[in-house]
């Protein structure tokens, strides 16, 4: 019986396809904590306090109908506030990064049922993903590249 093995240097060049790495898992399998969002009318101080209580680095900002408008970068906000560049009573809507909603950049729907391989592709170009229900009526969670890394390490090869 003949067998063949790859030379040691060649075996390092092989990487698993994303689908194999996640073994068919979906976003729901990440067991993400529930999303924390702020209203666009929320004050900077309140948003920073709530973010630190929950250990979130980015927080989605929602409009009155609870649709995502954008997000705030908590560390950046805190730095600006501590430097006296913004007032604690200012509204988060004035300091958020707005989501681009243009035809050339269609909205990517990420739900609890989205395969992790698709989430990984999305996160190659974004710092986090907003996970919504399939009808996009409410925000379920936020997913980050760190969440994927944790999942893979927890699950093992």
Image (cartoon, rainbow, N blue to C red):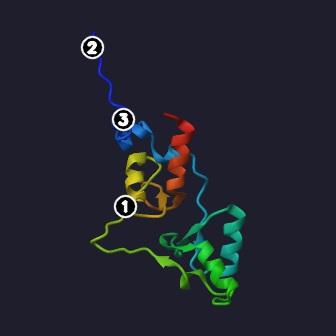
Find residue 117 and name its label. none
Based on the displayed image, in which of its 4 quarters is residue 16 positioned? top left
The Cα–Cα distance between marks 1 and 3, rounded to whole angstroms, is: 35 Å
Q: Residues within 10 Å of mark 1 (few under 14, many from 20)?
A: few
Query: Can residue 43 be seen at all in this image of the molecule?
Result: no
Q: Residue at x 57, y 46 (%)?
A: 31
Find residue 108 and name its label. 1
Q: Residues within 10 Å of mark 2 (few under 14, many from 20)?
A: few
Residue on which the image places disc 2? 2
Quadrant into which the N terminus falls: top left
Q: Is residue 76 left or right of residue 157?
A: right
Q: Earlier in the sequence, mark 1 or mark 2?
A: 2
Q: Is residue 31 left or right of residue 1?
A: right
Based on the displayed image, in which of its 4 quarters is residue 83 positioned? bottom right
Q: Check disc 3 and report its element: helix, strand or loop.
A: helix
Of 119 and 109, nearer the camera is 119
Query: Can residue 99 be seen at all in this image of the molecule?
Result: yes
State how many labels appear: 3
Q: Earlier in the sequence, mark 1 or mark 3?
A: 3
Find residue 11 and name its label. 3
Of 140 and 48, nearer the camera is 48
Is 119 drawn above or below residue 3 in the view shown? below
Is 58 drawn above or below residue 119 in the view shown? below
Percent of width and height locating residue 20 = 38, 37
């Amino acid at each position: 019986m003949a067998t063949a093995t790859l030379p040691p240097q060649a075996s390092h060049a092989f990487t698993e396809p994303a689908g194999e790495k996640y073994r068919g898992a979906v976003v729901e399998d990440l067991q993400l904590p529930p999303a924390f969002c702020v209203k666009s009318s929320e004050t900077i101080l309140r948003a920073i306090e709530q973010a630190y209580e929950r250990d979130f680095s980015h927080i989605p900002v929602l409009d009155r109908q609870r649709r995502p408008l954008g997000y705030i970068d908590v560390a950046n906000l805190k730095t600006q506030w501590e430097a006296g560049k913004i007032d604690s009573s200012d509204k988060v809507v004035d300091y958020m990064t707005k989501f681009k909603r243009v035809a050339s950049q269609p909205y990517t729907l990420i739900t609890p049922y989205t395969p992790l391989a698709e989430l990984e592709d999305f996160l190659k170009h974004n710092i986090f993903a907003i996970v919504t229900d399939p009808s996009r009526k409410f925000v379920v969670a936020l997913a980050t590249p760190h969440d994927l890394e944790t999942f893979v390490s927890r699950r093992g090869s």
